[in-house]
Amino acid sequence: MISQTALHITNRIIAAFLGGYAFTWGLSALAITTMVTLGIDFHEAETGMTLVAFLVFLALFLWTFAAASMLRVWLVLAGGAAVMMLIATMLQNSLVS
């Protein structure tokens, strides 16, 4: 039988990797789309955001293990990722139209 501590640590590891990745991906998509909308070249926006994304992912990874509430962690990571990806998709669709 798996102990509660092992489940707690596993939950944090999954949140750190998958939730952190999804949040960083959503932030990158939104930031790149916004910068392209403002007239910055796509490749410059992509390169700049990739550099920032490494720092964002690191901060989220560390915060996941430091946070007291896993509910808050999942709400921020999953909710933030979903909202940013949705806004980025809507903005990209408006650029294409």
Image (spheres, grey):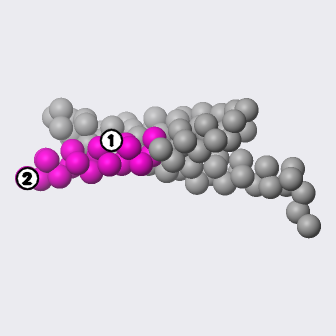
Q: Mark 1 and 2 residues: CB-CB less than 8 Å, in contact? A: no
Location of residue 62 in the rendering, given as x and y in whole percent from the top left corner: 67, 36
Main SS class of the magenta portion in the image: helix
> Which span is picked out in magenta?
80-97
Task: Let me know if residue 96 is in the magenta part.
Answer: yes
Which disc, if any, is residue 30?
A: 1
Q: Does residue 1 appear left or right of residue 72 in this picture? A: right
Q: Farthest residue in the bottom direction?
A: 1
Whichever of labels 1 and 2 marks the residue nearer the N terminus, that label is: 1
Which disc, if any, is residue 97?
A: 2
Location of residue 8 in the rendering, given as x and y in whole percent from the top left corner: 79, 49
The amino acid pointed to by label 2 is Ser
Task: Let me know if residue 40 is in the magenta part.
Answer: no
Location of residue 67 in the rendering, given as x and y in whole percent from the top left corner: 70, 33
Q: Residue at x 80, y 55 (%)?
A: 7
Which disc, if any, is residue 57?
A: none
Distance in Å between CA atoms under marks 1 and 2: 18 Å
Q: Residues within 10 Å of mark 2 (few under 14, many from 20)?
A: few
Q: Residue at x 64, y 49 (%)?
A: 15
Q: Does residue 51 appear left or right of residue 63 in this picture? A: left
The amino acid pointed to by label 1 is Leu
- The answer to whether one can see residue 25 in this image is yes
- The answer to whether one can see residue 46 in this image is no
Q: Farthest residue in the front direction?
A: 71
